[in-house]
Image (cartoon, rainbow, N blue to C red):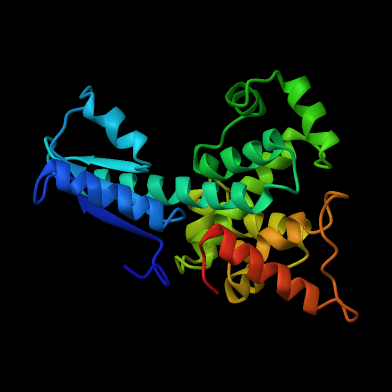
Amino acid sequence: MNQEGTDGCVVDADAPSRDKALMEIRRLRRRHPALALVVYADVHESDPELVRLGGLGVDGVVLARRPPWASAIRRAVEGALAVSRARGVQRALRGRFPDGAAGAVAWAVERATDAPSVAQLAAAMGHTPRSLTALLREAGLSSAARVLLWGRLLHAAALMGRDGRTVEDAALRLGYSTASALSRAMKRETGHTAGDVARGGGLPFVHQRLFANVNSRSRNLVGNDGREGVRAETDDVATQVGVHL
């Protein structure tokens, strides 16, 4: 399988047999760590086999013992894509930010459509809101609320970039009252319009503009005219998050 141009795949976990399918899943995850991996499996919600699937790096499961509702399949696929994108964002931040800060950003990307609160983010990271804020500020990030906002913008960028969603679709998915509200937030935080984001590559484009100058440990990639370095880091981020420009 060539991952170029592919964000995710669905694998039948029971064909030709469970053991052979699990071997294929293990191989896919090892060869394509950024791939969103969904399995269709003959299991139930409390089946111990789900733990085994999780241990192989599966991002989402469609339960064969339930009616094949399109909405359930869509949720599984969208959830897996969110997990995969969050994993890619965290990988791109590794080495530039402490693990706790990078993990908080990744969590915010993954849960962006749930409109999580600062308290929920802090609990997920094993912190109080106050201790999480201290950790983020030490890393060069202003606040937990800002991290949640950036998570929404990164998720929106992914929707408008590779997924080809309109600004209106992305705004609705992320709980913004209007497309204009999302556009204003994007412009304020990145200096670019939603149209720029869609044309510029989506997630890698926004990632670079949000994080390039946040932390003193970041590499200075800006060239003499200020453009070559931006492109260089955008290409690097695209590789890390598993999104191809």
Q: Residue visible at 17% across and 28% down?
A: 44
Q: Position of residue 97 (x, y in %)?
A: 75, 43
Q: Residue visible at 58% across and 25% down?
A: 124
Asked whether, in this view, residue 185 is left or right of residue 74, the answer is right
Q: Quadrant of the N terminus?
A: bottom left
Q: Position of residue 187 (x, y in %)?
A: 74, 62
Q: Residue visible at 82% across and 60% down?
A: 219
Q: Residue furthest top?
A: 128
Q: Position of residue 141 (x, y in %)?
A: 80, 41
Q: Residue visible at 52% across and 43% down?
A: 110
Asked whether, in this view, residue 181 is left or right of residue 85, the answer is right
Q: Position of residue 185 (x, y in %)?
A: 71, 54
Q: Residue furthest bottom?
A: 225
Asked whether, in this view, residue 225 is left or right of residue 149, the answer is right
- 235 up-or-down from 151: above or below: below
Picture quadrant of residue 108: top right
- 62 up-or-down from 4: above or below: above
Q: Quadrant of the C terminus?
A: bottom right
Q: Please tell me which residue lies in front, 43 or 2.
A: 2
Number of marks in picture:
0
Asked whether, in this view, residue 239 is left or right of residue 80, the answer is right
Q: Residue furthest left?
A: 16
